[in-house]
Image (cartoon, coloured by chain):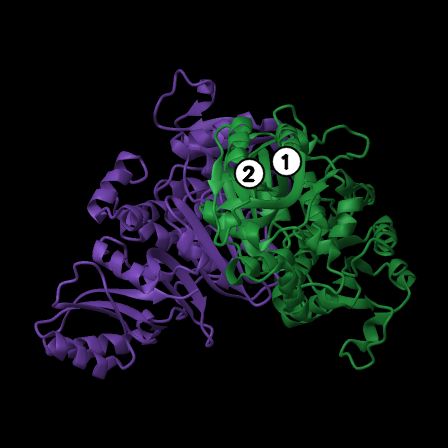
Chain colours: A purple, B green
Amino acid sequence: MSKIAVLGYGVVGSGTVELFYKNKERIEGKAGKKLNIKYILDIRDFPFSPYADKFVKDINVIINDDEVEIVAEVMGGLHPAYEFVRSCLEKGKSVVTSNKELVAAKGYELLTVAKENNCNFYFEASVGGGIPIIRPLHQCLAANEISEIAGILNGTTNFILTKMIEDQMSFEDALAMAQSLGYAEKDPTADVEGHDACRKICILASLAFGRHVYPDKVHTEGISSVTLEDVEYAENWGGVVKLIGSAKKLSDGKILPMVRPAFIEKSSQLSAIDDVFNGIMVKGDAIDKVLFYGRGAGKMPTASAVVADIIDAAKANGTSSSQTWEDGRDVDFIEDFKQDETSMYVRINCTNRDKALEEINESFGDVKYLARKNQDKNELAFVTPSMKECEIDKRLSDLCEKGIKVIGKIRVFDF
Amino acid sequence: MSKIAVLGYGVVGSGTVELFYKNKERIEGKAGKKLNIKYILDIRDFPFSPYADKFVKDINVIINDDEVEIVAEVMGGLHPAYEFVRSCLEKGKSVVTSNKELVAAKGYELLTVAKENNCNFYFEASVGGGIPIIRPLHQCLAANEISEIAGILNGTTNFILTKMIEDQMSFEDALAMAQSLGYAEKDPTADVEGHDACRKICILASLAFGRHVYPDKVHTEGISSVTLEDVEYAENWGGVVKLIGSAKKLSDGKILPMVRPAFIEKSSQLSAIDDVFNGIMVKGDAIDKVLFYGRGAGKMPTASAVVADIIDAAKANGTSSSQTWEDGRDVDFIEDFKQDETSMYVRINCTNRDKALEEINESFGDVKYLARKNQDKNELAFVTPSMKECEIDKRLSDLCEKGIKVIGKIRVFDF
């Protein structure tokens, strides 16, 4: 019998407890042993819960109970989750978590503490909700040299963009709708500005490339400046706008991680991932590419991943997993994103259209012009050839001096 | 140090050896120990291979060498692969295989022998080539009660159907093209008639539902009778024709597995899986649905899965996996497919169109008529409402007696 403690009884915590008891027999079968939840930690009272007798408010009850072998941290946020998790690992308890903020900030440290104490730190639920990605990446694709990972990692922004694309809703209206449906928080910053996707690509990149990628090293742009006009131009170009988190390994061994809205061609599998769904593409030298698709958030999908980790922790029987990576804090291994080659969609305003066309053609050579309904005669939109982003910046800044005003730009992402 | 033997040096075998030595350091890192290939079994001579010194022709050399801990069976076919694998497992050697025919026919038996001898029998490569599916299904989705699995499991037929849909090639021309590109064998029966997809859905269903589903219990139809007219009607209906292998759990606990061409709506993720790619959807009570997509065959993708299994076998360190199921030979747990409810696309010939329309409407009620270019005036195509297939058969047979001749029918699959 392995005893479990669940830290936090919010959406994911209550889902974890519910799923555990719903499928307990199956779960124990897979784990090969009896399991039970001994404690649920929450500062709130739940007197009418069927699990009322399991609630505790003091983490030390859990930390100091040697019967507790597995801890599921599903409270979210960095503090006090970090202190709780670290203390549990130091006591040799395996910890499973859905907390991407924690893993992105402290993954290396907590994996190291787990290893030192011969227990495990698992985080399948931290990326892609119920979609299996962490374990397949580590285990099933273990024979591959991974060259790139890219995905739609945030359901909230994908829902908003889908509404903009399919129903011509403005960003503000789509955000309000997402909030009313419970897909977006009252303060939507973490989703909308790309921070959530950034944490997830940090975790995936750390695992795939073996060195901790910290969020503050990742260039991150959200979708709040994406307009309906951009969406229309993307359609005319033959694609859609998606928020993409990606990380690739460069030929010199450096890593280039980034989060940004991007034009994606309709022929890409990523373009068809709509609403709150997530999709993650992995490129490897043997498998070419594989895609993992499903619900990237939500109570039960996330609980599914948490409970799968609980099963693995129970099966590990005091052995520590090889799922780990090195530190990356003081290592120069992140390439400046401005050095990356990309095509760029650019939307400009000008006073003299013919002159602007001439200047743009002279500056960029072979550009592809895009059109939209009701396009203002002083507005132009085009996609540049592929070149270093710093070079694109330079040329656009030269055009600016000639009275051509850039009012929007979005990178083209080819996968 | 774990020593490995590779049985068979064909496409997958040579890929496995190549990938192993290409990424040896990474693979050993993941396995947590040194690994090496000691033997390669093949009846042919490879005097100029860099691994010439490893080749043996007698399986007993491998079976009787206690140094060999892991055997990769990549020869294909049922015999002598079955005898070789069984003998290796009886000696306590873990076996990994890409051989779907073997797993579909003998999975239960070989898993049992592995368990008895405290070793492992892994087969990630037997379904979906390089796509992680067996382990995610067993491990990452372990907390779920799986209700249905459905997928495009055969790349050859998917390539042929894609050519029919996108380039209006006939089945025969598309098959010839697949053969010239090396996607289809000289004798394409196993692919084209659905046997390959059948073996794969047997493996997935056995794992998901816990009881061995044997291929001879699965209703299997291939794509050789799918015509360009059917493809056109599917387009008009708003979908595509795909070869679908599926298995679902019914409310009475029985399993309904099937392989057949099907109309799939364009809004389904499965409809966008083209060319030689495979895609597998899994429905569970917690995760809702997830999709796994990638290259379902080919030298290196399949080798990727074989080597991942080798790593897992090396890590298992003499413990036997919980990845297993019960026998299903003498158990009545497969539902008759004629009892399943489905909509059906039906294409008919008649002599009196108005009379036929009247008869069809009277028989089926609310049908949806489809159109195609150059449709003969004596031809009608429609999609029936959902009802038991035996009921559809009965009504079509009644129509037949009234001079309405069914010249094509394809089930509608909704996922």
Q: In this image, A408 relative to A145: left or right?
A: left
Q: Using the image as rendered, state which of residue B365 and residue A305 is in the foreground.
A: B365
Quarter of the image for the N terminus of chain B: give it.
bottom right
The relative height of residue A351 versus residue B47 in the rendered view (above or below) is above
Which mark, by number, is residue B223?
none
- Is residue A187 at least partly visible in the picture? no
The quadrant holding residue B387 is top right
What residue is rendered at 50% in x and 34% in y?
Answer: B286
Of all chains, the one bearing label 2 is: B
View extreme (left): residue: A351
> How far from the left and from the top, in percent, is residue B96?
74, 54
> How far from the left and from the top, in percent, is residue B34?
70, 64
Which mark, by number, is residue B403?
1
Q: Using the image as rendered, state which of residue B363 and residue B303 is in the foreground.
A: B363
How far is mark 2 from mark 1, CA to CA?
Answer: 9 Å
The quadrant holding residue B9 is bottom right
Hey, what amino acid is under mark 1?
Gly
Residue denoted by label 2: B352
- Is residue B277 at least partly visible in the picture? yes
Marks 1 and 2: in contact by CB < 8 Å?
Answer: yes
Q: Is mark 1 on a helix, strand or loop?
A: loop
Q: How crowded is mark 1: few (under 14 residues within 10 Å), some or many (20 or more)?
A: few
